[in-house]
Image: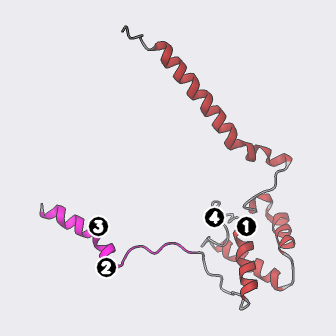
Amino acid sequence: MKRVLFLLLLLAAPAFFSIAPIPARAAPAPGTFSDPAMEARARNLQRQLRCLVCQGESIDESHAPLAEELRQLVRQQMVEGRSDRQIQEFLTARYGNYILMRPPVEADTYFLWAAPFLVLIVAGGVAIFVISKARKAAPSDPL
């Protein structure tokens, strides 16, 4: 009984002593802009670009060294006066459409866009097949 109470106390301790894990936040860029509008523009653009290492995160969220380099590159190009579109085109030319969080629908990306729907259709077909086979195999209950 004492061990159970001790384990419960250990599990509840972070809540009582404010040692709870801190939620993850976007990695701070080393050279942030002093102008809030430029900083907002940079953060917005960074959210639209995929981290090539983490794959599920934007470069704004990622802590990977490559993401840090890409954040610096985006900010450097903004200082040089390039538009968001020009920066995206530059990075797409260098890394391909994969760097965009929302790649364009093109002939070579049709399968990527259709894949979730194809998986649902196949899963539904398998479910219908299994259910109908189970119904046929089940003995009928006389009333």
Q: Secondary structure at mark 1?
A: loop
- Alpha-carbon span between mark 1 and mark 3: 39 Å
Q: Quadrant of the N terminus?
A: bottom left
- Residue beneath disc 2: 17
Residue appearing at x 69%, y 37% in the figure: 118
The answer to whether residue 124 is magenta is no
- Alpha-carbon span between mark 2 and mark 3: 11 Å
Q: Secondary structure at mark 4?
A: loop
- Residue beneath disc 3: 11
Q: Are marks 2 and 1 in contact (CB under 8 Å)?
A: no
In this rendered view, identify the residue nearer to me: 55 or 135. 135
Q: Position of residue 132 (x, y in %)?
A: 54, 19
Type of amino acid under label 1: Gln
Magenta portion: prevailing SS class: helix
Type of amino acid under label 4: Glu
Which callout, 4 or 1, points to the residue nearer the camera? 1
- Residue beneath disc 4: 57
Q: Position of residue 30 (x, y in %)?
A: 65, 85
The answer to whether residue 21 is magenta is yes
Q: Position of residue 89 (x, y in %)?
A: 86, 67
Residue appearing at x 85%, y 64% in the figure: 93
Residue appearing at x 17%, y 65% in the figure: 5
**Res 72 → quadrant:** bottom right
Q: Earlier in the sequence, mark 2 or mark 3?
A: 3
Q: Earlier in the sequence, mark 3 or mark 4?
A: 3
- Alpha-carbon span between mark 4 and mark 1: 10 Å
Q: Secondary structure at mark 3?
A: helix
Left or right of residue 130: residue 91: right
Q: Which residues are magenta?
A: 2-25
Q: Relative to 122, is 30 above or below?
A: below
Q: Earlier in the sequence, mark 4 or mark 1?
A: 1
Residue 48 circle label: 1
